[in-house]
Image (cartoon, rainbow, N blue to C red):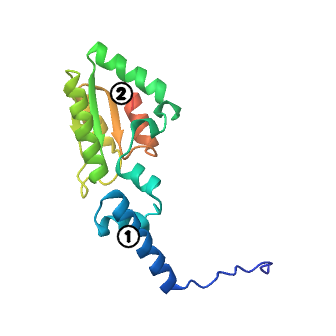
Amino acid sequence: MTQQKRWKIPAVDSEKATELSEKLSEELSEALGVSPVVAALLVRRGMTDVGSASAFLSPDIKDLHDPMKLTGMARAAERLAAAVIEGERIALYGDYDVDGTTSVALMTLFFNALGVEPLCHIPDRVSEGYGLNTAAVESLAEQGAHVVITADCGSTNHAEVARAAALGVDV
């Protein structure tokens, strides 16, 4: 099968692109009162006007997406509320990277503010690998967890989620 069309990618004048980038960085630096380095990073991230750069640097909660539009969020929120009200044991399971560990730390603070002391599990990168693992799910169930909240992992661990369900644990 032969290709019918060929992409024609125009050459970029790198000198002009650099000049434009520097000009935009300078404008943002002055307008926002940020260092030239921060302004250059903003431009490289695609924030080339004061409005978008300002919104990035000073986000407003009203600009966040509605989390209730995520599939299953209402059901998950109801389940967690019931677990808190009924005093069920909640476990937090985060991946070993920065996203996972930070998420577990933030959720721990949240649950502590509600008077809940969650179980926390961050898997060992070498011995447990990435994502949920059956041994950890079984251990959390043995420790009394009725609900496991995953952070930065678990969405494709169908066998492990099924094992949790068999143990009476909601993930």
Q: Is residue 94 visible?
A: yes
Q: Position of residue 46 (x, y in %)?
A: 47, 63
Q: Position of residue 165 (x, y in %)?
A: 41, 29
Kindly report which numbered mark, 2 or 1, lies closer to the viewer in this rendering.
1
Q: Residue at x 51, y 83 (%)?
A: 16
Q: Quadrant of the C terminus?
A: top left
Asked if 19 appears above or below 75 in the picture, the reply is below
* Tag of residue 26: 1
Amino acid at the residue labelled 1: Glu
Q: How many numbered discs sit on the rendered protein?
A: 2
Q: Residue at x 39, y 63 (%)?
A: 28
Asked if 115 appears above or below 43 in the picture, the reply is above
Q: Residue furthest top?
A: 86
Q: Is residue 64 visible?
A: no
Mark 1: few, some, or many residues within 10 Å (few <14, many ≥20)? Answer: some
Q: Position of residue 141 (x, y in %)?
A: 28, 30
Residue 60: quarter of image: top left
Which one is in front, 82 or 54?
A: 54
Q: Secondary structure at mark 1?
A: helix
Q: Earlier in the sequence, mark 2 or mark 1?
A: 1
Amino acid at the residue labelled 2: Val
- Whole-number angstrom distance, CA of label 2 to CA of label 1: 55 Å
Which one is in front, 4 or 144?
A: 4
Horizontally, residue 79 falls left or right of residue 71, namely left
Q: Residue at x 69, y 81 (%)?
A: 8
Q: Residue at x 77, y 78 (%)?
A: 5
* Tag of residue 56: none
Q: Secondary structure at mark 2?
A: loop
Which one is in front, 17 or 50?
A: 50
Mark 2: few, some, or many residues within 10 Å (few <14, many ≥20)? Answer: many
The residue tagged 2 is 169
